[in-house]
Image (cartoon, helix red, strand yellow):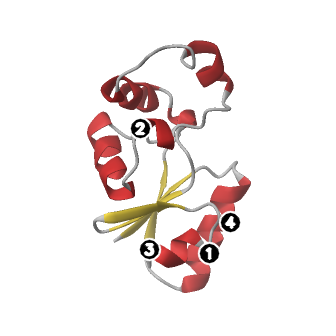
């Protein structure tokens, strides 16, 4: 099952969602700000993305700059921070079975499907 981790307020996330709709494939939408990912779910997504936790963090977000940027954090701590502050997670993420991509640009979704 294809899942898009979506923030409806984000232009890039809306573009990714539109791309999935246009492909005509069945998928599930998870609005991760309203339904945050657990640390285990984030760990699984990171493996599918083949990313380090820092690569998944939106480093221009105010909460990152103000509270975390200057700290030397472990991968486990970074995952915990994303679970507590889902706004920090890059978007959209599109997951399909054992692979995932960041859907920016939306053409990345083609590589997954």
Which residue extends farthest right? 11
Q: Quadrant of the C terminus?
A: bottom left
Residue at image x 67%, y 61%?
A: 14
- Label 1, label 4: how many angstroms apart (C-alpha)? 6 Å
Q: Is residue 59 left or right of residue 51?
A: right
Q: Name the residue carrying label 3.
A: 112
Quickly name the residue at label 4: 15
88 versus 23 height, above or below:
above
Q: Residue at x 63, y 68 (%)?
A: 106
Q: In the rendered structure, are the residues bearing label 4 and label 3 in contact, judged by CB atoms less than 8 Å apart?
A: no
Helix, strand or loop under label 3: helix
Mark carried by residue 19: 1
Of residues 14 and 100, the one nearer the viewer is 100
Instruction: Please state the horizontal and vertical placement of residue 9, each as a whole percent of the image.
Output: 70, 48
- Depth check, mark 4 against mark 3: the one in front is 3
Q: Where is mark 2, residue-wise?
A: 53
The residue furthest bottom is 24
Instruction: Give percent across and percent down for residue 69.
Output: 57, 20
Query: What is the C-alpha distance between the residues marked 4 and 2?
Result: 24 Å
**Percent coordinates x, y for residue 104 in the rendering:** 62, 60
Marks 1 and 4 in Cβ contact (< 8 Å): yes
């Amino acid at each position: 099952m294809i899942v898009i981790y979506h923030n409806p307020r984000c232009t890039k996330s809306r573009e990714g969602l539109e791309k999935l709709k246009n492909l005509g494939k069945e998928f599930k939408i998870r609005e991760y700000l309203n339904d945050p990912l657990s640390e285990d779910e984030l760990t699984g997504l990171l493996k599918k993305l083949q990313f380090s936790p820092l690569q998944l963090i939106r480093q221009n977000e105010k909460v990152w700059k103000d509270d975390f940027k200057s700290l030397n954090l472990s991968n486990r701590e970074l995952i915990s921070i994303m679970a507590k502050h889902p706004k920090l997670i890059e978007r959209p993420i599109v997951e399909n079975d054992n692979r995932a991509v960041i859907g920016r640009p939306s053409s990345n979704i083609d590589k997954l499907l």
